């Protein structure tokens, strides 16, 4: 069922170019894709009148659009909610969709949790990082210490960290390893400070043989966290224990990171993972398709590799969508289905109000101001600064005009928005830390 829904979603997008917006809203978008039966699309509408309109005015457009997508002749059968047979089937299949989606999630999760060197696909963009990780896994604290991995989100850093941990557990079963994200390290520290139990915290982190810290960049600017991590790092290093860190940028580019920590991070080996080349993406798609038991034609593999540009995680999301299609449909995956899956994963057609909300929420989180205050008429200094930054980011990410941006902030006029943008640009040009903060905000919004 989900596969047919993907086909119908693609068809609706194509028909938007052929049918007026009014007709789309009145008749086409209200259609529920119900089933695919013997080269026939069964479509559910709300009334006999609705069915008559579809069959008399839009049948050929719908048939031709669906045929163009699937590559063979497809007819349509329009039924109404009065047809109890089809309505019952519609409800049953939608419930079945939920179960299928749950099973797919469980299958993918079980595959993705198996982070090993064997299922890590290497290419020019990650081969040096891969080699360094294998060296550390074979000789903890003797090869490279500390090991610092960096690269954009979703390129495989976490996979490599867990692969090292898996390999060490296999080769050195007596070794005690600990994987933690930097935010969890901070939260753990806060909790132990609150309960006045710092000795337990020190024992937890300083008694391990190998410490993995993911997203280490997030300790920057947190004085207490940096202080405690500095002492944790020193204790482990002086006792000959392995330290492995991962970040989205090299130590020199982590703003607000204390120099004493930066120098320690740079004292071992620093290796990066960058955006995968086309050939590596193809190899990853093929390997994961085998793992997910998906039969992908070469043209579909090429299409996905060409379109997914951000990270490997998006590749996995697209393949998961295609797997759902293959399980519930007798149709082989094709480019139209891949296109629909990519649109879902990359949010290419995400509604503008959703993007606006994400911008205001992310700016508010970073500037410690509520979204309500940002959109309000308040003129308190920190709120005004956050509001100006939100306007700037909105202009950077969206195609909205200055008046349209102003409407998002209680109807402010275009001159106010223009002033805000100019002010942010001036501040960013004179303050590298502030410029980096803006870049982080934009990066987080795009990733979410």
Image (cartoon, rainbow, N blue to C red):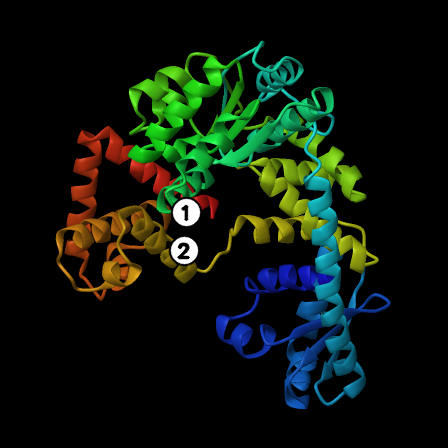
Instruction: Kindly state the secondary structure of the residue where label 1 is placed.
Output: helix
Whether the residues at callouts 1 and 2 have beta carbons within 8 Å, the answer is: yes
Whether residue 288 is visible, yes or no, is yes
Q: Which quadrant of the structure image shows residue 331?
A: bottom right
Q: Earlier in the sequence, mark 1 or mark 2?
A: 2
> In the image as oriented, which residue stretches furthest toward the top?
142
Task: Work out which quarter of the rendered image holds the N terminus and state it.
Answer: bottom right
Q: Nearer the viewer, residue 49 or 211?
A: 211
Dot in front, 1 or 2: 1
Q: Nearer the viewer, residue 144 or 284?
A: 144
Question: Residue at position x 31%, y 34% from top?
Answer: 224
Q: Nearer the viewer, residue 252 or 29?
A: 252
Question: Residue at position x 22%, y 66% from top?
Answer: 410
Instruction: Kindly state the secondary structure of the residue where label 2 is placed.
Output: helix
Question: Residue at position x 77%, y 43% from top?
Answer: 292
In the image, 281: left or right of 233?
A: right
Dot 2 corresponds to which residue? 355
* Crowding at mark 2 (Cα within 10 Å: few <14, some 14-19, many 20+): some
Image location (x, y in percent) of residue 323: 74, 50
Vertical placement of residue 81 versus 443, above or below? below
Whether residue 34 is visible, yes or no, is no
Dot 1 corresponds to which residue? 445
Image location (x, y in percent) of residue 300: 72, 42
Compute the Cα span from label 1 to label 2.
Answer: 8 Å
Vertical placement of residue 182 versus 419, above or below? above
Disc count in the image? 2
Q: Which quadrant of the structure image shows residue 283?
A: top right
Image location (x, y in percent) of residue 75: 79, 69
Question: Residue at position x 41%, y 18% from top?
Answer: 234
In the image, 199: left or right of 272?
A: left
Image location (x, y in percent) of residue 197: 41, 40
In the image, 351: left or right of 395?
A: right
């Amino acid at each position: 069922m989900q596969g047919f829904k993907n086909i119908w979603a693609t068809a609706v997008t194509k028909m938007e170019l052929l049918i007026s917006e009014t007709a789309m809203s009145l008749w086409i978008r209200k259609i529920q894709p119900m089933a695919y039966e013997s080269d026939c699309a069964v479509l559910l509408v709300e009334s006999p009148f609705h069915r008559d309109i579809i069959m008399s005015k839009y049948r050929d457009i719908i048939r031709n659009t669906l045929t163009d997508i699937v590559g063979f002749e497809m007819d349509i059968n329009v039924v109404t909610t009065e047809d109890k047979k089809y309505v019952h089937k519609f409800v049953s299949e939608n419930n079945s969709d939920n179960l299928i989606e749950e099973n797919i999630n469980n299958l993918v999760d079980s595959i993705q949790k198996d982070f090993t060197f064997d299922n890590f696909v290497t290419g020019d963009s990650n081969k040096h990082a891969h080699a360094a990780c294998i060296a550390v896994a074979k000789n903890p604290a003797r090869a490279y210490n500390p090991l610092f991995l960096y690269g954009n989100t979703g390129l495989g850093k976490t996979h490599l960290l867990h692969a090292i941990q898996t390999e060490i557990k296999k080769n050195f079963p007596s070794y005690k390893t600990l994987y933690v994200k930097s935010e969890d390290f901070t939260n753990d520290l806060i909790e132990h400070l609150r309960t006045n139990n710092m000795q337990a915290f020190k024992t937890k982190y300083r008694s391990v043989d190998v410490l993995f810290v993911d997203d280490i960049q997030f300790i920057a600017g947190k004085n207490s966290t940096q202080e405690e991590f500095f002492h944790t790092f020193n204790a482990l290093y002086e006792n000959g224990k392995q330290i492995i860190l991962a970040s989205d940028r090299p130590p020199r580019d982590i703003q607000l990171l204390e120099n004493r920590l930066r120098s320690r991070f740079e004292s071992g080996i620093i290796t990066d993972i960058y955006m995968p080349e086309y050939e590596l993406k193809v190899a990853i798609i093929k390997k994961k398709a085998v793992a997910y038991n998906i039969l992908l034609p070469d043209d579909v593999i090429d299409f996905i590799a060409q379109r997914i540009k951000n990270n490997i995680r998006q590749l996995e999301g697209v393949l998961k969508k295609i797997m759902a299609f293959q399980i519930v449909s007798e149709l082989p995956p094709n480019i139209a289905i891949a296109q629909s899956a990519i649109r879902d994963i990359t949010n290419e057609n995400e509604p503008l109000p959703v993007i606006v909300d994400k911008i205001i929420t992310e700016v508010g989180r970073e500037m410690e101001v509520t979204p309500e205050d940002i959109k309000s008429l308040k003129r308190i200094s920190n709120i005004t600064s956050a509001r100006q930054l939100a306007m700037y980011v909105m202009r950077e990410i969206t195609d909205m005009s200055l008046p349209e941006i102003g409407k998002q902030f209680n109807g402010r006029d275009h001159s106010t928005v223009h002033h805000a943008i100019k002010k942010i640009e001036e501040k960013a040009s004179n303050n590298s830390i502030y410029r980096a903060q803006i870049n982080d905000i934009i990066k987080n919004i795009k990733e979410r």
